[in-house]
Image (cartoon, grey):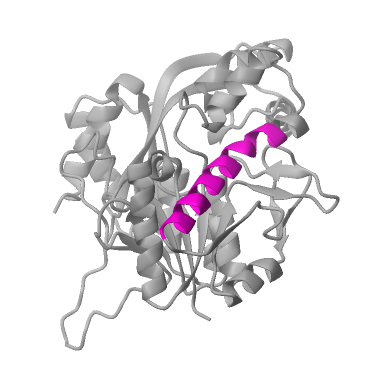
């Protein structure tokens, strides 16, 4: 049995016309000899009647502190609705289709309501239905605990569902369908010259996703990478080949030409972050002071990023919406943090950065020439990050895209 996992986002199932495009992709898979497993997200986005955020707004207006267990029950409804509608659509167009919730599909998670991790997948029910020639539709973003409690998988959970099923079913590929034609060198809303990237490694796409590219969640990539199952990022509404994500590049044909290594893959950005600088002076046990600071953030459920530990203190970023909470915690600990609100992290990503001299120098030169101050920087073997003021974010992304010739 040749299994293909197809995941469709909320915009892909939002209208009857768009669902017809989904059915067309499923039909294409069936006629190509595949047994498709279709993962769906909730219909639409915030403000749409059946979107997850719409449900949350309704209940939080009544009681803002509803326990996470009950929130998960609510948040699982959107995918059930979209899955039922898609099964109805498939059946009306001549396909035998069956719907499973995440739990019914065998997705077992831990008990971390709101951000559960998949422990294992028991795909027996799915395989039984595929053997009968049915199209199996699975609600994304959800699973159940060992004792049957409904959980949700956090941001990007439907991508994670698709990858977990792909691994458990030993699928030939996992197709992630969105409203764009693949992973691009930069956000096309910011850079008109941005182009679709034909192939990426798992590591490159993970870095792009972690640094702000929102086409696929990095957790989904990491799961697919475990079994080297190819990921393909495609558009629901076009026949473009999209972006292939794998460990290996496809065959380039026979010949003696050498393809030069690609230094940079693309530019990613994350807006709306606040920089915090905590000066600890000549603390006797500096490492213990640093530990206290980050432990306090963790206990308050505040995610920290862009961490720089220095002899005189620590520098890090948090999301704008939790910045005031973070500052209050630090003040209660006796610190007087420096605060730079409304920043953005801009990253250049590429598997070829490591060991190549001059990349950071070119980045700094380009931003300096464009009049963009760098507030903080860091690097790894695949990524160089800079923190800039939010009002400079667009200029920074456009400048770096042009500097490194990513549009050609």
Q: Position of residue 216 (x, y in %)?
A: 45, 49
Question: In the image, is residue 86 part of the stretch drawn in magenta?
Answer: yes
Q: Position of residue 362 (x, y in %)?
A: 23, 44
Magenta span of residues:
72-93
Please count the marks in the image: 0
- Residue 331, relative to residue 366: is it above or below? above
> In the shown orientation, is residue 105 left or right of residue 320?
right
Quadrant of the image occupied by residue 192: top left
> Can residue 333 be seen here?
yes
> In the shown orientation, is residue 296 left or right of residue 223?
right
Residue at 75% in and 41% down: 112
Please identify the dominant SS of the magenta region.
helix
Residue at 13% in and 54% down: 408
> In the shown orientation, is residue 288 left or right of residue 398?
right
Q: 256 or 248, which is in the foreground?
A: 248
Residue at 71% in and 14% down: 63
> Can residue 380 be seen here?
no
Q: Position of residue 106 (x, y in %)?
A: 71, 60
Q: Position of residue 406 (x, y in %)?
A: 20, 50
- Residue 323, relative to residue 239: is it above or below? above
Q: 28 or 107, which is in the foreground?
A: 28
């Amino acid at each position: 049995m040749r299994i293909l996992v197809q995941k469709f986002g909320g915009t892909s199932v939002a209208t009857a016309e768009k669902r017809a495009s989904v059915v067309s992709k499923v039909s294409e898979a069936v006629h190509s000899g595949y047994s498709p497993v279709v993962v769906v997200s909730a219909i639409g986005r915030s403000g749409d009647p059946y979107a997850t955020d719409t449900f949350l707004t309704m209940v939080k207006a009544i009681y803002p502190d509803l326990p996470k267990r009950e929130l998960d029950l609510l948040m699982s409804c959107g995918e059930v609705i979209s899955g039922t509608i898609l099964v109805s659509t498939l059946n009306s167009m001549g396909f035998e289709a069956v719907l499973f919730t995440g739990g019914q599909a065998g997705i077992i998670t831990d008990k971390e309501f709101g951000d559960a991790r998949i422990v294992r997948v028991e795909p027996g029910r799915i395989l039984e239905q595929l053997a009968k020639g049915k199209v199996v539709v699975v609600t994304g973003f959800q699973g159940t605990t060992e004792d049957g409690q409904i959980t949700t998988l956090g941001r990007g959970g439907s991508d994670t569902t698709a990858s977990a099923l792909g691994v458990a079913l030993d699928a030939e590929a996992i197709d992630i369908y969105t409203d764009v034609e693949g992973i691009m060198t930069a956000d096309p809303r910011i850079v008109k010259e941005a182009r679709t990237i034909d192939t990426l490694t798992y590591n490159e796409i993970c870095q792009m996703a972690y640094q702000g590219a929102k086409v696929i969640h990095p957790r989904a990539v990491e799961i697919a990478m475990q079994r080297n199952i190819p990921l393909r990022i495609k558009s629901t509404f076009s026949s473009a080949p999209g972006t292939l994500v794998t460990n290996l590049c496809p065959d380039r044909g026979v010949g003696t030409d050498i393809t030069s290594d690609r230094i940079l893959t693309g530019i990613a950005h994350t807006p709306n972050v606040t920089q915090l600088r905590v000066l600890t002076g000549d603390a006797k046990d500096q490492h213990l002071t640093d530990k206290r600071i980050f432990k306090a953030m963790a206990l308050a459920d505040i995610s920290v990023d862009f961490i720089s530990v220095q002899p005189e203190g620590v520098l890090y970023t948090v999301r704008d919406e939790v910045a005031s909470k973070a500052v209050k915690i630090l003040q209660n600990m006796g610190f007087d943090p420096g605060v730079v609100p409304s920043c953005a992290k801009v990253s250049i990503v590429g598997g070829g950065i490591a060991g190549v001299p001059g990349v950071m120098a070119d980045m700094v030169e380009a931003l300096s020439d464009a009049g963009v101050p760098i507030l903080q920087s860091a690097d790894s073997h695949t990524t160089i990050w800079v923190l800039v003021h939010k009002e400079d974010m667009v200029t920074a992304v456009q400048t770096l895209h042009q500097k490194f010739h990513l549009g050609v």
